[in-house]
Amino acid sequence: MNAREPSNPSGGPIPDARIAEAGVWIARIHGDSRDSAQEAGLRRWLHEDPINARAFELATEVWVDAENLRRVVSWAPQPAPAKAAKTQPWRLTLAAGLTAALVLAFVLFQPGPGVSTDLGEQRALTLEDGTRVFLNTDTQIVVHYDDTLRRVELKSGEALFNVAKNPQRPFVVTAGDREVKALGTSFVVRKDERQIAVTLVEGEVSIRPLAPQAPVYETFTLTPGQRMTFAVGAPPRLDTPPLEASTAWRRGQVVLDDTPLSTAAMEMNRYSATKLVIAEPEIQQVRVSGLFQAGDSVSFANAVAGVHNLRVTQEGDEIILSAQNNN
């Protein structure tokens, strides 16, 4: 077996997405920002599916030899040349240590019906029917499966669902007062205090109100690329945002396109305990565009300040953006 032809314990190939997820975990746990929350997130991810453990092992092997990842992990020891590395005893020690860590993760962490992520954490899991769920930062779901219905309740946050097809057993996501129904499809549901949004990536979903007295016209069917938003005190709104932007969080990114600074700050604040604060109302409508790293509020503030001639100051857990003439 080699890095180009990875296989899982059952003999089939390891999906590319799992390899990519494992690579992200490798970078996180070997980076300067490693903490107990990331370690706990890794252990949960390893337990969710045996394929994850195999993908992590393979990604670890690649990390040892890959020049580009050695640049990211600056303190990593310089490996021996490729031919010698295959026979070095430390590689066997690494494999043994990794195996022990994986066994520990499987023993200590048992999944339950409720799954959540902390601020700045993301995770992926596979449900019993093969449905893949990707949770964004500060998200909570509860899984309710029975013999006739697969239901997931999104209590808060954002999740991407890649639904396993089973026409005899519908798949439903509830969020607030809305129900999203799909057979086999991929879609994103986001729920916060202000609104609920459903974005269809592929397939087809229908959205209806949970309240039986709600009017029939509030039932909607989406086609790929469409997003339906239900905001408090406003009529439902249909638009077609770029899917790359809607799912950028899966790559640890935030994509903004002519977004008011106040809204951009709220979006960045979803991923970090260090909060962006806009000092004056007159700069809240400054328009922001670009691709930013989720959780890196300092770089975001500096970039925006450079473009719009703003001032950046930090006080405790707050990064304050203000006009240059504000004294």
Image: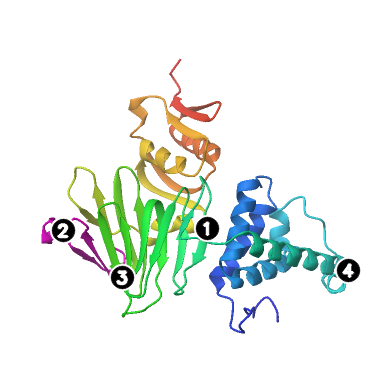
Q: Which residue is mark 4?
A: 89
Q: Which residue is mark 3?
A: 182
Q: Which residue is mark 1?
A: 123
**Mark 3: which secondary structure?**
strand
Left or right: residue 243 versus residue 54 is left
Q: CA–CA distance between discs 3 and 1? A: 22 Å
Is the Cβ of the residue at disc 3 closer than 8 Å to that at disc 1?
no
The answer to which of marks 3 and 1 sits earlier in the sequence is 1
Q: CA–CA distance between discs 2 and 1? A: 34 Å
The residue positioned 33% from the left and 71% from the top of the image is: 149
Name which residue type carries label 2.
Answer: Pro
Q: CA–CA distance between discs 4 and 1? A: 33 Å
The residue positioned 46% from the left and 47% from the top of the image is: 138
Left or right: residue 219 versus residue 273 is left
Mark closer to the observer (3, 2): 2
Name which residue type carries label 3.
Answer: Ala
Q: Badge 2 local density, few (<14 within 10 Å), some, or many (20+)?
A: few
